[in-house]
Image: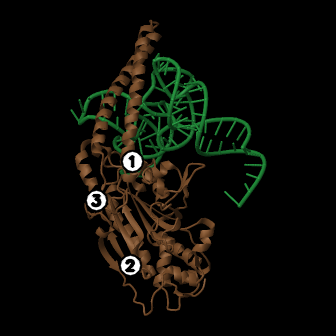
Amino acid sequence: MLDPALLRKDLANTATRLARRGFVLEADRIAALEEERRRVQTETQELQAQRNARSKAMGAARAAGEDIEPLRAGLSALGDRLKDLQESLSGIQAELREISLGVPNLTHESVPVGTSEDDNREERRWGEPRRFDFEPLDHVDLGTRLAGVDFELAGKLAGSRFVTLSGSIARLHRALTQFMLELHTREHGYTEMYVPYLVSPETLTGTGQLPKFREEQFHIEKQDYYLIPTAEVPLTALAQDRILEAHELPQRYVAHTPCFRSEAGSYGKDVRGMLRQHQFDKVELVHVVRPQDSYRTLEELTGHAEKVLQLLGLPYRVVTLCTGDIGFGAAKTYDLEVWLPGQQRYREISSCSNCEDFQARRLKARWRNPELGRPELVHTLNGSGVAVGRALIAVIENYQRADGSIDVPEVLQDAMEREVIDRA
RNA sequence: GGAGAGGUGGCUGAGUGGCCGAAAGCGGCGGUCUUGAAAACCGUUGACCCGCAAGGGUCCGGGGGUUCGAAUCCCCCCCUCUCCGCCA
């Protein structure tokens, strides 16, 4: 959520900035509601002050044994009027809130302006895409040959966009997860968390998935829970309704969780393989920091995700998402795109975002700034460190050999207890 | 699932209709004392909203009701704890 003051005092400018990311702000509607809100709120508060004063006087009069009936009649009428006003006020406020919850974050000035992923800005590349002296296969063919990846089997259980992994491939998936968790906790200073995979609608609203992206969530009807689309949701919400002391910041969390996405609206996109699934695992990194630290932290966080790919020896590039491609709550996002020989292109494997105070405002996540002498919103950041399923794909495709077997990246060989996977 | 107890400020915990945004203690902050520290003593210490400000308003788990007036009375919901049953 944006600072409400922006919609009150700097509406036109805010609308212009939002237009850059392709969002049309209902400025007229907001201006009208604000004006009415101010009028009704002022009157409400005046009447409340009157009621408080006169009720108090009435208490005193009664104690003094005076006749209070005339006073009572006047106050009763005032109470009725007040009730109407309060109803009207809360209606206006609810509508303003509803609008505000649907407004995306403002982007940082360093974010390139654009309309699609074609306008994203490449920042750097790491590693050379491998040259094959044979025709490389994609992970579907490789996995099927090894009998370790099965979409049909999963289809029988749950339908499309699910997969089963077995034997060495399942183990490779686990080894990747373990490797990432160890790296981030040992080398990068994160605190490992185990968190709920089901969360309340309030939590999902706090991190920005609701109300706008309800269609993309899996919802448990019976109890009004949502399956988390990413561990960003529970990890960031750890700061919900808190006022953290200065010495408690920064907080950095890592968690390995499954992620659930309905992928509504992506029909026909990435239907082959396990690039886009209803369920996938991810190791997620979340920072809660002082506002002045958030952009430095974004670079650090991105570096932590990059380290995973570097140690795995996977070529990748870093792009800054443009205003047309960036996510709802982010002010700035770096995507890490790993090279996939099966597709001969770079594909997203991590997304690292600074949400500034956008989520913090929704979550009421604050800290005690000693310089301000009052609570101030924190900044929150999140990044995949990295998507496990996609890392699995990248390893399989990049480390394939002519005979269809897979070399095990060095950093995983101990965990895998082998150097080559030649069958599941 | 059954029975009971309870949700008040950073924490513990008083408060059963107006004098309560709320006692007291702890913790925090400032000071006195001290070579320094501790102890002791004194003072101070919630969040949010509107407003340039002065000031006003809201908040005692959430929602609704009674009343001139609700932390306090009534109703619904949520959560926590204890015991029993079941169970990974």
Q: In the rendered picture, chain B carries what hue?
A: green
Q: Earlier in the sequence, mark 3 or mark 2?
A: 3
Give the residue drawn at x 46%, y 87%.
Answer: A136
Q: Which mark is residue A101?
A: 1
Give the image location of residue A387, x and y in percent.
47, 70
In the image, taking residue A163 as reference, residue A315 lies left or right, namely left
Are dots 3 and 2 on a single chain? yes
Secondary structure, mark 3, is loop
Return the chain for callout 1: A
Q: In the rendered picture, chain A carries what hue?
A: brown
Q: Which amino acid does label 1 sit on?
A: Leu
Q: Name the residue under label 2.
A: A345
Q: Which of marks 1 and 3 is nearer the N terminus?
A: 1
Secondary structure, mark 2, is strand
3D distance between C-alphas at marks 2 and 1: 36 Å
B5 or A320: nearer the viewer = A320
In the image, taking residue A138 as reference, residue A6 lies left or right, namely left
Q: From this view, report whether residue A417 is shown above or below residue B1.
A: below
- Would you call the spot at circle 1 few (<14 residues within 10 Å), some (14-19), or many (20 or more)? some
Secondary structure, mark 1, is helix
Q: Mark 3 points at which residue?
A: A108
Q: Which amino acid does label 3 sit on?
A: His
Give the image location of residue A56, x and y in percent.
42, 18
In the image, taking residue A120 as reference, residue A258 lies left or right, namely right
Give the image location of residue A28, x and y in percent.
27, 42
Q: Which amino acid does label 2 sit on?
A: Arg
Give the residue drawn at x 55%, y 88%.
Answer: A420
